[in-house]
Amino acid sequence: MRRFSTAALIAVALTLGVAGCASDAPPSAPAGATRPVTHAMGTTEVPASPQRVVVLDTDKVDTALSLGIVPVGAARAGEASGWPAYLGDKVSAMKEVGVLAEPDLEAISALRPDLILGSKFRQEKFYDELSAIAPTVFTEKVGITWKENFLLDGAALGKQQQARDLLAAYETRAKQVGTKIGTPGDRKISIVRFMPAEIRVYGPESFSGIVVGDVGLGRTERQLLAGKDDKRFDKVSPERLAEVDGEVIFYCAYGEKAAAQQAGVTGGDLWKNLAAVKASKVYPVTDETWMLGIGVTAAGKILDDLEKHLTS
């Protein structure tokens, strides 16, 4: 898979004009001052120092909090039962404004935002209505472009340099974890997610797959998703559970229904016969960090899990 260094990502961001300005917006910017940000839907004039931000995807919750901004409102992942616990107590101040696929426009408007961050992939049909409420910036895709998205959202928030620094620190730590593991490419990692109605294996272009790749860890042949255009994830039926096997398995569940399915599958003989299970190399992890976080703070939590389980 093609990978980009932090320097390359920053160069791309500047070429596209997403930076808007050369450095973080000063906190003393004149009232009403704006700057242009180029994004998936065009170019938008955004406040130099936005104060009331609404975010419409889980990565943007992570991004805003990572950059020291508490959104006034956020859309919730459909199966999630609350805000991400890994981001701490500050998330309790956010107001819910619908779910990712169906943001609540009235609730958003009532919060009087001065900036809205969303995703073309999830909310393209709402863009015009959202733009009528406040300046709106959309990233293009999810998962595979999480680093580019982080830099773009950081620029829109007036925190470009801080975003660069955090991303660089993450990449440095990922290499350090790989070094600590030692020959990480020899470890064949399987990432499994239980959904309410299916089981998924996650490939090299998923968020968690990219983090695992940044550490230098190897992947099972099944999860390289060779020959598939979408290398984020693939589905596996319970009868073909052997396909999720690996030297090490990290697994999680999206919501309560998925957790019930996970309990049933992991209590069965097919799961117990997996090589990783027999070797006691299976580790439950948190869905909100491995799957929903899609930002530098969540990525750091994944690094914590990898360091804990693969270097002990």
Image: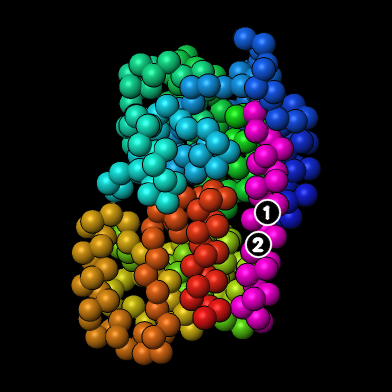
The answer to if 242 sits in the magenta stretch is no
Give SS at disc 2: helix
Q: Give the range drawn in magenta.
A: 158-183
Spatial CA distance of label 2 from label 1 is 6 Å
Vertical placement of 255 versus 242: above or below? above
Q: Taking the image as drawn, is residue 41 in sight?
A: yes
Residue under the point 27% across and 76% down: 266
Residue 146 in the image: state x and y as whole percent: 58, 48
Vertical placement of 238 versus 130: above or below? below
Residue sitting nearer the eye, 276 or 200:
276
Crowding at mark 2 (Cα within 10 Å: few <14, some 14-19, many 20+)? some
**Which image quarter is the N terminus in?**
bottom right
Vertical placement of 48 versus 252: above or below? above
Residue 173 circle label: 2
Say which residue label 1 marks.
169
Question: At label 1, which amino acid type do we have?
Answer: Ala
Residue 15 in the image: state x and y as whole percent: 78, 36
Q: Are marks 2 and 1 in contact (CB under 8 Å)?
A: yes
- Main secondary structure found in the magenta portion: helix
Residue under the point 70% across and 44% down: 164
Vertical placement of 26 versus 142: above or below? above
Residue under the point 40% across and 38% down: 91
Residue 63 in the image: state x and y as whole percent: 54, 41
